Image (cartoon, helix red, strand yellow):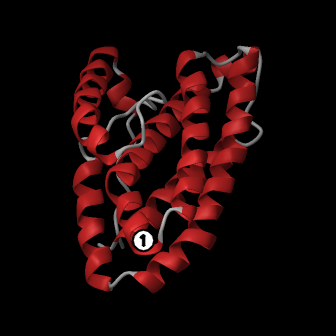
Amino acid sequence: MDAITFLRQDHKSVLGLLETLDGAPSGTGAEASGLETVVNNLVISESQHEAIEEQFFWPAVRDAIGDGVVDAALEQEQAGKQVLQRLEDGKPGEPDYHHALQEFVKLGREHISYEQDVVWPQVEAAMSRAELEKIGEKLEAAKKVAPTRPHPNTPPNPAVLKTMGMGAAIMDHVRDAFTGRADDNPPDPQVK
């Protein structure tokens, strides 16, 4: 599957989660609503998505079309990781948790729009179908072992992510299995 198709599927999944979380209950109602499970799904999905983009997609985009759009996208992703970390550290019902959730819903939609409307048309014009297929294969394989937590202090450097990121991913998966969080890990969307 080519990179754009793969990323589009991920975006569709995340947009569905954002739609579910838009206007989510706060206060005591948030604890009983199942909000934490949906937010865990969001944190897992987004953490994996951003990690694999930073390892494989953004370096290829930088080579194909330059620094401008990549730097802007990475800044957006870093801001998103900071907010995801607040969600990871918080609990439903806490005031900052709900504020962080609403902030991420807004940031997530803006970032997806930026990628789809600004970046992807340039990528499709600059890269061959074969290049996009090769990147898509890497993204698909990497997602299966990608970190499931945001790790906002890890620099978005492909070399760092391929080494340190692998260690973080292993720790995330072990921690998820131990805490039962792995049960919340959403399945990868299937191509139809």
Quick one: 22 or 83, which is closer to the camera? 83
Quick one: 88 or 58, which is closer to the camera? 58
Quarter of the image for residue 128 reads bottom left
How busy is the neighbourhood of tag 1: few (under 14 within 10 Å), some, or many (20 plus)?
A: many
Quick one: 158 or 135, which is closer to the camera? 158
Q: Position of residue 131 (x, y in %)?
A: 28, 77
SS under mark 1? helix
Q: Can the viewer see residue 34 in this picture?
A: no
Q: Position of residue 52 (x, y in %)?
A: 35, 50
- Residue 27, compared with residue 109, is above or below; it is above
Q: Quadrant of the N terminus?
A: bottom left
Q: Position of residue 111 (x, y in %)?
A: 62, 54
Quick one: 115 or 9, which is closer to the camera? 115
Q: Is residue 26 left or right of residue 115?
A: right
- Residue 36, compared with residue 89, is above or below; it is below
Report the residue at 68% width, 21% height from top. Answer: 97
- Residue 10, compared with residue 33, is above or below; it is below
Q: Can the viewer see residue 157 in this picture?
A: yes
Q: Which residue is mark 1?
A: 4
Report the residue at 34% width, 62% height from top. Answer: 190
Report the residue at 26% width, 31% height from top. Answer: 164
Count of numbered tags: 1
- Residue 188, compared with residue 181, is above or below; it is below
Work out which residue is located at the far front of the displayed protein and give it.
Answer: 67
Q: Is residue 126 left or right of residue 74?
A: left
Q: Quadrant of the C terminus?
A: bottom left
Report the residue at 65% width, 19% height from top. Answer: 92
Quarter of the image for residue 39 reads top right
Q: Amino acid at mark 1?
A: Ile
